[in-house]
Image (cartoon, rainbow, N blue to C red):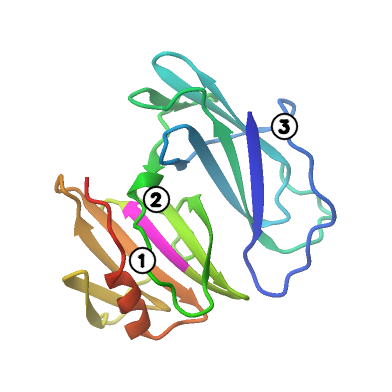
Amino acid sequence: MSHRWVVVAAFALAALAGDRAAGGPDLPRAAVTTVLLSADGRELSVARSGECLGTGELRARETPSAVLLDFRNDPPTPDCYGGAELTVWSARLAAPLGTRALRDAGGGAPVPYFRAADLPAVGPLPPGYRHAYDAPGYLGTASAGQWGPAASELFLAGTARLWLVVEYGRHWPDGWPGGGVAPLVVVQGRLARVGPGGIAWQQRDAEGAVRSYALVADPPLPTAQLVGMADRLRVVMR
């Protein structure tokens, strides 16, 4: 069982004409990278971003010891018209993932995942902002990649966007501090870096593992406002 949803992720972009039908086994297989595992352990999601994304489908095959993910994604046709978007495809499991291995059906490679239960609970948002969605991956921070499983929360106020990104392990957004010494502020009782459009910091969970956090706004918000939001995050410590 699979479903998907689409979120426009750029300013003043034309809407896609019509809704693309769900994909099928005839579509090219795409590698599964970072997955977001829902808080109840039963839904797995993958994401792609770009212009006029093609059709796709995520399917999960369950065994007692593993879950195999088969992701099919067709690239857009040359005559595609539209704008940048983020598409998330999800598959619902019959039982929680639990201790079962998560693997790519295309070759059996292990698939890393981020637990949605590890996303912080967000306190009062800046005026006008609302929660839009959660997605797997290191999105919205101009990062060329990620080092560990990550997830992103997006908050919208009209065309303005605010991202909260959490990643397992140590990782600063690419390009920070941009060739100079990054200004520092105090967040959650520890030092945080101020970078292009946002702040980033790291802290340990109850087991001593490091998680990396970034709050980035487009257009930028005052640093003091981001610090206030970061201090109100209720970070889950296992």
Specify the quadrant that holds the N terminus: top right
Name which residue lies at 31% across and 70% down.
230
In this view, the residue farthest toward the top is 64
Name which residue lies at 84% across and 52% down.
18
Q: Are marks 2 and 1 in contact (CB under 8 Å)?
A: no
Q: Is residue 210 magenta?
A: no
Q: Nearer the viewer, residue 42 or 76?
A: 42
Residue 128 x %, y %: 54, 78
Residue 201 x %, y %: 26, 67
Decide whether the magenta segment is chiefly helix, strand or loop: strand
Res 27 label: 3
Q: In the figure, is residue 1 to the left or right of 103?
A: right
**Residue kind at label 3, given as amino acid type:** Leu
Q: Earlier in the sequence, mark 2 or mark 3?
A: 3
Q: CA distance from mark 1 to mark 3?
A: 35 Å
Q: From the viewer's perspective, is the residue at label 2 or at label 3 nearer? A: 2
On screen, residue 17 above or below 32: below
